[in-house]
Amino acid sequence: EVQLQASGGGLVQAGGSLRLSCVVSGSTFGDAAIGWFRQAPGKEYEGISYINLNDGNTYYRDSVQGRFTISADNAKSTVYLQMNSLKPEDTAVYYCAAVSGGDYNSGWTAEEYDYWGQGTLVTVSS
């Protein structure tokens, strides 16, 4: 069974940085796409970035392009989300999710992902 463990959230001032980690276990790490989603209070899940571990391609939502960087450490079976220049509107619970590398369509919708980690709260104060 695939399991994901997200961590790294916290409280940070606007303009600050955080790095989220997502440890993936119980699978062949390289054969997956790992996505980061967030859910702000009263809002739906929003896919913000994902990486295809088969080819290393990365994708970003416009709202985080240039500020967030997704990366993977195969040796540690971990995907990171480096978040810089944080804004109050980035405040949300952040989740990582996984889907088999060949089984997703756009990569942006929660329904495409089969496995989810628990959320980690990111709070950005103004």
Image: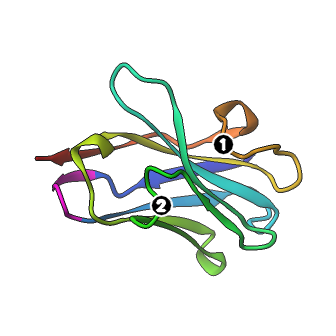
Task: Work out which residue is located at the far bottom of the displayed protein and give it.
Answer: 75
Front residue of 92/100: it is: 92
Q: Nearer the viewer, mark 1 or mark 2?
A: 2
- In x, y percent, where is residue 40? 36, 31
- In x, y percent, where is residue 126? 10, 47
Vertical position of residue 112 compared to residue 32: above or below:
above
Residue beneath disc 2: 65
- In x, y percent, where is residue 36? 54, 50
Vertical position of residue 6 compared to residue 54: above or below:
above
Residue beneath disc 1: 108
Q: What residue do we see at 83% from left, 56% from top?
A: 101
Question: In the rendered structure, does residue 107 fall within the stretch colored magenta?
Answer: no
Vertical position of residue 77 compared to residue 27: above or below:
below
Q: What residue do we see at 44% from left, 50% from top?
A: 63
Q: Is residue 78 left or right of residue 16?
A: right
Q: Is residue 72 left or right of residue 119?
A: right
Q: Are marks 1 and 2 in contact (CB under 8 Å)?
A: no
Residue flagged by tag 2: what amino acid is it?
A: Gln
- In x, y percent, where is residue 113? 71, 39
Tell me the crowding category of disc 1: few under 14, some 14 to 19, or many 20 or more residues within 10 angstroms, Cα based.
Answer: many
Task: Work out which residue is located at the far top of the displayed protein and give it.
Answer: 42
Q: What residue do we see at 44% from left, 67% from top?
A: 66
Q: Is residue 18 left or right of residue 71?
A: left
